[in-house]
Image (cartoon, rainbow, N blue to C red):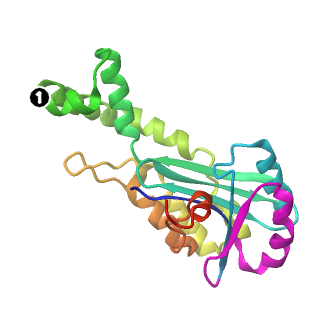
Amino acid sequence: MSEFTTGVLYAKQYEPSVLLSLPFSRQPYFHRRLNKAWNAFFLEDECLEKAETLKFLRKVSGRGIPLLWFHDSEEYGWGFRLFDQGYEVTSATIAYDLECELVERELERRHPGIDIARDVIENEQLRREYDHILHGLIHSGRLRQEIRKGIERVQPHCFRCILSALQIQQLQTVFDLNLLCQYDEQTGSSLLYESVDLFKEILGIEELVWVSYSYLASGGRE
């Protein structure tokens, strides 16, 4: 089973205020101390899909408590949303399988009804076509355009509420479009896959792994 992690992080110094505020989220939650610098809470609305959840996070951040919602799905990608002074000030979504999704979409357009998982493996001609489409995406700039969409709201300077100037400089490298777009067609390696670990290292939240509201609610069985 692949990793799924999501939670809301905040600086440990705000613990008393956050603990007082959490019941006003009007939903079940868990609260944990992550490390010496960070705490985290985990809401039932894990992916911030409800307007009430966003309203709650904005309200708490409006009291001078910056909140960082973070998610990481090992198979699909990772991202964050930072709330400060009552607003969502910056966000990002990094999709790991972006190039595969685009290639599969094009193959399905060309071959309606195709079973991607089976036919591309069993049919050598389709495998060559898959590689050809992937090569075209990379060299046409289409893949770059799609990656840019996921980071167009990234504003590293907005992290000044929780990070040092050096850490903000390091974040700028993580979200450098030129670096994110580098793709080794032979190995399939890309900074897209490494960016989440770099982000967590810069923030000092490496301990935030394999945890979510669902995981905690299940007693750690999922």
Image height check: is 78 above or below 163?
above
Residue 86 can be seen in this image: no
| Residue 173 magenta-highlighted | no
Give the secondary structure at mark 1.
Answer: helix
In this view, which residue lies farthest toward the left? 124
> Amino acid under label 1?
Glu
Horizontally, residue 220 falls left or right of residue 133, namely right
Residue 212 image position (x, y, % from top left): 58, 61
Q: Count neighbours of disc 1 (C-alpha within 10 A) and say few if under 14, some if 14 to 19, many if 20 or more.
A: few
Quadrant assignment, res 119: top left
Residue visible at 88% across and 65% down in the picture? 63
Residue 18: x %, y % from top left? 81, 70
Q: Quadrant of residue 80?
A: bottom right
> What residue is at 82 percent from the left and 57 percent from the top?
25
Q: Is residue 58 visible?
A: yes
56 or 148, which lies in front?
56
Looking at the rendering, the stretch of residues picked out in magenta corresponds to 10-36
Give the residue displayed 33% in from the left and 21% down from the top.
Answer: 108
Which residue is under mark 1?
124
Residue 18 magenta-highlighted: yes
Left or right for 135, reference 41: left
| Nearest the eye: 207 or 160 | 207
Query: How many labels sit on residues?
Result: 1
Q: Quadrant of residue 136?
A: top left
Q: Quadrant of the N terminus?
A: bottom left
The image shows residue 66 at horizontal and vertical percentages of: 76, 65
Give the residue drawn at x 59%, y 44%.
Answer: 152
